[in-house]
Amino acid sequence: MNRTIRAIIGAGFILIIMFSAISISQNIGKSWKVDITDQKLYTLSDGTKSILTKLNQPIKAKLFYAKTAALKGPDQIKYFNNYYEFVKALLEEYVAESNGMVELEVIDPRPFSDDEVAAMRYGLQKFRITEEENFFFGLVVQTQFGVEKVIPFFSPDRQNFVEYDISYLIDNAITRQKTKVGIMSSLPIMGDDMSGYMAQMMMRQGLRPKGPWTIVEQLRKKYEVSEITTDVNDINDVDILLVIHPKELPERTLFAIDQFVLKGGRTIVCVDPHCYADAPDQANMQMGVQQSRNSNLNKLLKNWGIEMPENTFAGDRNLAEERAISQTSRPEPIIGFLNIGKNCFNHDSVMTAELNEVRVLFSGVLNEVAEDVNQPKESETVIEKTPLIMTTNRGNTFTISNPYELMILNPSNLMSRFVDGTEPVTMGYLLTGRFKSSFPDGIEIEVESEDPNDPNETIKSTKQIKGLKNAPEDCAVVVFADVDFISDSLAYSKSFFGPVIIGDNSALLLNAIDDLGGSSDLISIRSRGNFKRPFIKVNEIERQAEEETAQEVAALNAQIAGFQSELQSILAQAKEGQEVVIGSSIFEKQRDIELKKRQAQQQLNEVKLKERERIEHLGNVLRGFNMLMAPAFILMIAIILGIYRSVKKRHYISHASDA
């Protein structure tokens, strides 16, 4: 075998070894991936990992992305290519962390194919690009029991919460039972009892029983809703408890709520220092009986790390909505009637990230309770407090001396007494952590038992009831300092077709229920950070360039403005038709000023061009650096290997000569 054939065979073996090494590296390297992004965008959170480790049935994830159609679409569609790569990489992390319980299938639905028909059957959102091509970008999660959960479209405004949305889909796919919501309220939020003797009596008197609040009807469309009385001893058989306007609850009810939370029950509390929905009873008003409109749960709230002070309200001049308090008065801003905008929501929380407008009516204030420095700190009792809704930086609190100030409202008086603040005031919190009981020694309740001496009589005695002192697992409670925001007057409006949703008041409560309705692991998943990272170096160069040329730009702008003013003055003084007479002194002067103006504008453009050239120069340097990195790295390896081989060769020759 001659040298040429040996060289060809050797080159062939090298190619085979190289391609085999690449293939092996691709398979092995999947478990060696490193997330070097600043905000760990490609690393799953601990909550997602916990959900995946608890999977007891295989999950199939079908990622539909019309990649071929995207190449034919406009730039708005082509943008999704990078988004798709991110979602795909994230789903591959789900597969890697699931120990084989999650299977990923990536589908490019082509026109008239079975995949396109399946995408439409699943309810994925379709965007027509051409007469034949349709764009899809959604996810379908399937279980072996036939449960299907769908993300119809990966919207760009949900990119920060894409991990939460996927984990929520998986968590709900394996939870087949409908969420049970229990409502406890001192208000007739569930409506009047429309059955039995009382309903017949009301009908005879010509009175119609009041129906439930619209928010309750909305909840019933999605959840299994039941009523829980305010004198309950124990709370069972509900997943989420809504405590709305709790007024003077007995101790046994507070203890029942306390134990429900410690056992892992999710709870949403709406308290209010002055609830307008709590209309006073007409009979009591005629008799002069004063009815309180405030509610609080501070006995429990303080133990959870927050409190709501009495007769204290949140105010903000920037958010105050104008309303006329009577038909004859003019609209004026009411400091306690706040229209909370997008900038006042926590954008890192799934509950509030996408809200745009929520109106509250004289909402209370939630303050964090200072920790007792004398008490030893235990890691398991640390409570994380996440603000949800708040005022702007100009927000502040205001107090009233008497509830009649709000019953007979004087908006101008309240506004004149209000003092702007310097930091936001919080009206809603998400509290998570391992809570301690507000009743560590339990409670005593009065019980009736049969009299041993007389079977027809009963005797009363006290009984000690004890419960959990500490939560064995993480708890989750959402607290809002307003009740009116979910009332029919603020959250809905009447129309010919029925109640119409106004703003995001109802969405705020529904989002809270959805978030708490998942597992405790799901609650811990939050925003994946900001994908729109600023170009710090570019911004710095622009700032420096603007500072260096600020005086020159200002002088040129002033010069141009002066020329413009002088030109207008000349034209105003000219007689009719004189400004267009060729050879006239006015026309010559006008042309001279316009020439100077153009020269000044050209100088201004040259200054701005220099700024742009500096930025583009930086871009070229970075682009060239990135292009040269790989060749330079390979060249460095080649040089090191060459030096190493030369040293080894000399070492071999010296040993051979000695021999």
Image (cartoon, rainbow, N blue to C red):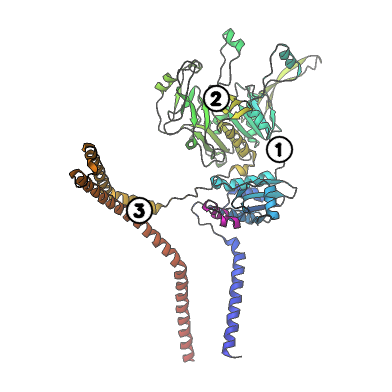
Query: Is residue 502 toward the left or the right of residue 552 in the image?
Result: right
Query: Which numbered marker is on residue 272?
Result: 2
Of marks 2 and 3, the one in the foreground = 3
Residue 77 position within the rendered picture, expressed as x and y whole percent measured from the top left? 55, 52
The Cα atoms of the two marked residues, 1 and 2, are separated by 30 Å
- Above or below, 509 against 459 in this view is below
Give the residue at the far top of this rendering.
287
Residue 11 position within the rendered picture, expressed as x and y whole percent measured from the top left? 57, 81
Pick whichever, 524 or 163, lies toward us: 163
Examine the residues drawn in magenta and state their main secondary structure: helix
Q: Secondary structure at mark 2?
A: loop
N-terminal label among 1 and 3: 1
Task: Say few, some or many: other residues with alpha carbon within 10 Å of mark 1 (under 14 / 14 to 19 / 20 or more).
Answer: few
What residue do we see at 66% from left, 36% from top?
A: 263
What amino acid is at disc 2? Asp
Magenta-drawn segment: 67-84
Q: List the residue tagged with mark 3.
A: 541
Q: Secondary structure at mark 1?
A: loop
Q: List the residue tagged with mark 1.
A: 178
The Cα atoms of the two marked residues, 2 and 3, are separated by 51 Å
